Amino acid sequence: MADEDEAGSRVQRTREALGRAGRRMRELDRSDGLRTAVQRVRRALPGDAHFGDPLSLGGARHAEFAGRAVVGLTGDRPGVTREVGLGGLQLWQAVLERFGGGVGEREVVLVFTDLVEFSRWALEAGDDEVQRVLRAVSEAWEKPVTDRAGAVVKRLGDGMMAALADPAAAVEAVFEARDRLAGVQVAGWTPRMRAGLHLGRPRRVGGDYLGVAVNTAARLGDRAGTGEVLVSGDLLSRLDESTLTVRRKRWHTKLKGTPDDLQIFAIDRP
């Protein structure tokens, strides 16, 4: 009987010790000071310090699958365990990209399109007409991209960002989108587009792309005129110029956030 009492006492002490350890671990996990310290370390590590937000976990790579698992296990609770787990995955993703295992090492043609004078027209048009235009524009733009194995990265109000692997296919997608858009008319208004394209090695974060290459394509789109397609010299060097009309564009001011040696060309079908 004494032996049984002693064994039961040891079991009870073990349970109590484990309970205290568990409570202590939960307290540490919820410690704001410790969590802030881990976040500071994450900001100093290579890679995306925001890895773990919905944007960064939208892809299909191993690090993103693991990140979703960490977030799923920890729920929406901010904690040290969550930050440590995501910090490890952040570092893993950065190493993969640096040594060629990440999407950031791949060349991608980035495309930005938008409508010219859309905002001014929308102020006078009704909400129904605006929605009709946006739906028609989406249909006109997106099919040429997806038909050529491209991806619509995101919709930007009256614009679109897309990514394609093949330079010639990217240009043809834009030309076809422009042709399809010419057949759209809503309330007597025919939307006109402009586009900017650049070939680069952007860093992929979830389902989005980040980096100078993205900014360059976006700036080209902003600078293009009505119906104009502007491309960088990097992209033009991968195209067959004999199938295009090409005109060098020069401005006195540099496009903000773009490489110093950026060359810009307007291209069209012959």
Image (spheres, helix red, strand yellow):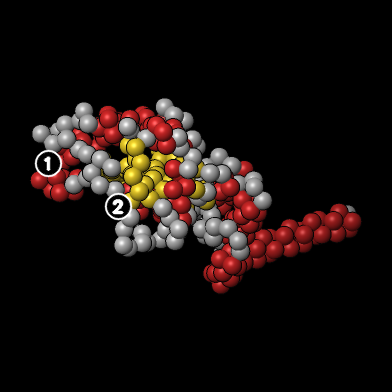
Residue 194 percent location from the top left of the image: 28, 43
Mark 1 crowdedness (10 Å alpha carbons): few <14, some 14-19, many ≥20: few
Closer to the eye: label 2 or 1: 2
Residue 67 percent location from the top left of the image: 58, 48
Q: Is residue 191 left or right of residue 53?
A: left
Above or below, 232 relative to 174: below
Q: Is residue 85 left or right of residue 240?
A: right
The disc label shown at residue 126, or none: 1
Q: Is residue 11 visible?
A: yes
Amino acid on which disc 2 is placed? Arg
Task: Determine whether the residue tagged by mark 2 lies in a helix, strand or loop.
Answer: helix
Residue 53 percent location from the top left of the image: 49, 53
Q: Is residue 108 left or right of residue 269?
A: right
Quadrant in the rendering for residue 242: top left
Quarter of the image where the N terminus is located: bottom right
Give the Cα distance between marks 2 and 1. Answer: 28 Å
Residue 158 percent location from the top left of the image: 26, 43
Outermost residue on the bottom side: it is 33
Q: Which residue is mark 2?
A: 223
Amino acid on which disc 1 is placed? Gly
